[in-house]
Image (cartoon, grey):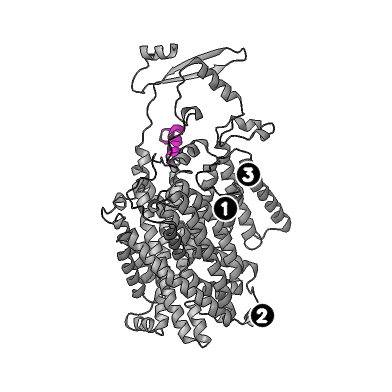
Amino acid sequence: MARWLPRSTDLTRFCQKLNRVKTLEDDMMETSFNRCLSTIDLTLLGIGGMVGSGLYVLTGTVAKEIAGPAVIVSFIIAGFASLLAALCYAEFGARVPKTGSAYMFTYVSVGEIWAFLIGWNVLLEYMIGGAAVARAWSGYLDSIFNHKIKNFTETHVGAWQVPFLARYPDFLAAAILLVATTFISFGARVSSWLNHVFSAISMGVILFILIMGFVLAQPKNWSIQEGGFAPYGLSGIMAGTATCFYAFVGFDVIAASSEEARNPQRAVPRAIAFSLGLATGAYILVSVVLTLMVPWHTLDPDSALADAFYRRGYAWAGFLVAAGSICAMNTVLLSNLFSLPRIVYAMAEDGLFFQVFSRVHPRTQVPVVGIVVFGLLMALLALVFDLEALVQFLSIGTLLAYTFVAASIIVLRFQQQKGDVLAPAAAGQPNPEPHEGPSRGELKEYESFSDKLQLVDREKSKEQREPGQLKAAFEPYLEFLSDFHPGEVVTVAVVTLMVSAICLCSILVFGNTHLHLPTWSYSLLLVLFSLGFLLSLLLIWAHEQQHSTQTFQIPLVPLSPALSIILNIYLMLKLSYMTWLRFAVWLLLGLLVYFGYGIWHSKENLREPRPQRVSARYVVFPGGSLEERVQAVQPSSQPATGLSDTDTDDCKR
């Protein structure tokens, strides 16, 4: 029976396959896409992706059913957490100007299987986002015509009473998705132009809502008689925050479009900062005027803003808001349909997804197959699924992507090999010179005896610290960590930090409610896991990190990514168990795709290491003598016959 058990070497090789990272090209500005997008184009794409159904639908849904007027606080917290994640996306987008967003960022820093799972969840995120917006678009248009479309469909087609499915098939939502898919297929320039038009109309409508809303505001709607400002308490605010993350999903469309940006090193960070700031301000101000115009418990979740104006006697204003909101939702549809095929393209180009999706149309320079196929899938989701179920499912995929991108920033910033490769490549510079040290698995040649002595001296001295190495100030206290390869201790610390964050957030969320822990054990566990989180953070900080002046870097690393990680995990745990159950099923489907197709067709799987014939090692003994040891490396299929004449001559030199 023992012979059927896998050998340790096989398990090691298998784990290495799962955690292999993507090899980037020397010139990352080279692409089959059309680099035609400016900073303004990317900013409007981000605004269009964020300011849509989240503004016109989620504000009313969260205010009435989850947080009350404290939806304002929910949006502030969600905006802050999104800012931490957005800064991580900005750094990656500038350093790695390739399409793929969170998938690509995870692939170049953490490992293949994690990148695939993130990409797999991002696919679902965009599909659900597009389907949810299409249903909101349909509901707003239906409200303009006094729900005649809904009544006609229920009368002639029928109604369903199935959990997580819509009451009736929404043919209008499916139709608008098919129309948007057609326009996206025409290329990036057409998509950008349409987004400019709809974004301009949307921002005009938002400005009208704010002015008119403050004129009609009634402070009594926040009074105790109406339930108060936070009727659902702190738990309602945090639960609302998790749902409000749907509003800020759109900023990663900028990172996904970096391969079509003219100057991604500058345009991507600026566009992310501008779009997120404007969108957060819009959400907060619109939430204020909405809950001040009418009592929060009387809001219509399907069309809150338009209905609020109708009830205040301004039917014309409600009609204008409904029409403007449709234009805003069009920008979100364009954003989702613009990003999704590019994520699929990146995965297919790397061999992790079906190769047919990596085809780019020679004239329009867009992945037409991915646009058409996933446009049809979005239309199917919008046709049959319920909006609330879709929105809850979307939040968990977004939060997971944010968490892995934040962890990837820490790993990348403290890794010598990957940092030395990525930073110059992103700036269009050649790879590091040989004296900067050999990469892992690569043998280094030294031409003279003095070079060998310099190698020994450099290994013994710690004056020149490289990324991932222990800082000189901490070496007397943590000397045992100096023997590890640069970046290894940081990687272990990042894993420990994430595990501590999961345990800490689990105690905070479930300790008093589901686990019913005594006060002493609750407090003890909080202290222990908090110490684990802080010690991991300090251990990471005790190592040297990369410092680049050529591309944007997120400040306060590792603190900023660590805060993003713990906040995202906390918000994920606040979601319902049904959301986690559906998420687990989707992950299992993804693992089937990866182990059935991706792991075998991965381009990294086709890269074979080049065999090296000679390896020279020099060891200094306490007596001060230098001993040279030569090892012949030959293919296993050939018997070892010693060194060739050429090898011997090289050693003598």
Q: In the displayed structure, would residue 205 be above or below residue 399? A: below
In the rendered image, the quadrant that contains the N terminus is top left
Q: Which residues are magenta?
A: 1-17
Q: Nearer the viewer, residue 317 or 294?
A: 317
* For marks 1 and 2 on the same chain, the one whose residue lies earlier in the sequence: 2
Residue labelled with disc 2: 223
Q: Residue type at mark 2?
A: Ser
Q: Main secondary structure of the magenta part?
A: helix
x 71%, y 55%: residue: 523
Q: Could you say where residue 436 lies in the image, as x and y percent from the top left?
A: 50, 30
The residue positioned farthest toward the left in the image shown = 363
Residue 544 in view here: yes
Q: Determine which of the numbered discs, if any, sits on residue 565 in the image.
A: 1
Residue labelled with disc 3: 536
Q: Is residue 139 left or right of residue 502?
A: left
Q: Residue type at mark 1?
A: Ile
Q: Could you say where residue 332 lies in the image, as x and y percent from the top left?
A: 42, 66
Badge 1 marks a residue whose secondary structure is: helix
